Amino acid sequence: MGEEMTNGEFFEILEAWAGEYYTEAIDLVFGNNLPMNDLNKVDADGMFKKNFLDSCQRFTEAVIVDFINFICASWGGDRGLYTHCLSKERYKNKKRNIYKGKPKGIHGSDFLAILASMAGDYHRECLESIVRSKHMNDLNESDIGLLKRKQVFFQKFADAILVDFINFIGAEQFGIDYAIYTRHLSEEYKKNREKEKK
């Protein structure tokens, strides 16, 4: 067995791919990847017609950063990642290349399974968490008001971002078509999977 990957290296990979993903996220979840989530054409049309786009971009960044911080906190750490840390310019300035190597001591599918499991735990508290952590993201009072008025849409949107981010890492980092759908985040789905394994 090779050298184990450290938690720090795990989060370096996540942060690097978050910096690469966030600018494409909205096009991906409302584009080719629409069949993998619970959003629909009506949601997409409404978002673009009502000028939700800027709010949705800030929301996307907030969800990604908060998810990474959630995983770190679950493991007893404090990553302290802010949305401004996602800029590609930051990675360029620090001469940090996107992590293309194979992570040490872990298979790609195991890495993605960790993310999928954590996303299943996180997605239920996502909306409350990003509002609670608004000092770490760029959500403004108008965004938060919109989120509270359109909770059903934004919950579906958060779930879509989470699974899309995981699938993006699978494809770009590992060359794996992981194909996690938003329905895979539900407790019911997990329970049924556990029954099948017994």
Image (cartoon, helix red, strand yellow):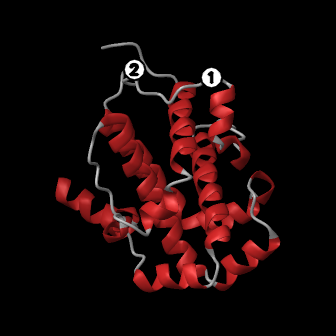
Q: Is residue 76 left or right of residue 160?
A: right
Q: Which residue is label 1 attached to?
A: 95
Secondary element type, mark 1: loop
Identified at 56% across, 79% down, the residue is 48
Secondary element type, mark 2: loop
Q: CA distance from mark 1 to mark 2?
A: 21 Å
The numbered mark at residue 24 is none
Query: Which corner quadrant holds the C terminus?
Result: bottom left
Identified at 64% across, 79% down, the residue is 51
Residue 153, picture quadrant: bottom right
Identified at 38% across, 69% down, the residue is 37
Identified at 62% across, 84% down, the residue is 50
Q: Position of residue 38 (x, y in %)?
A: 39, 75
Q: Position of residue 3 (x, y in %)?
A: 40, 13
Circle 1 Cα neighbour tier, 10 Å, few/some/many (<14 / 14–19 / ≥20): few
Q: Position of residue 62 (x, y in %)?
A: 65, 57
Q: Does residue 94 lie above or below 195 as drawn?
A: above
Query: Which corner quadrant holds the N terminus?
Result: top left
User: Residue 141 versus residue 44: which sits nearer the camera?
Assistant: 44
Q: Amino acid at mark 2?
A: Lys
Q: Quick one: label 1 or label 2, which is nearer the N terminus?
A: 1
Q: Is residue 103 left or right of residue 149?
A: left
Q: Amino acid at mark 1?
A: Lys
Q: Nearer the viewer, mark 1 or mark 2?
A: 1
Q: Is residue 73 left or right of residue 35?
A: right
Q: Which residue is label 2 attached to?
A: 104
User: Residue 107 versus residue 188: which sits nearer the camera?
Assistant: 107
Q: Does residue 40 lie above or below 73 as drawn?
A: below
User: Residue 11 versus residue 19: which sits nearer the camera?
Assistant: 19
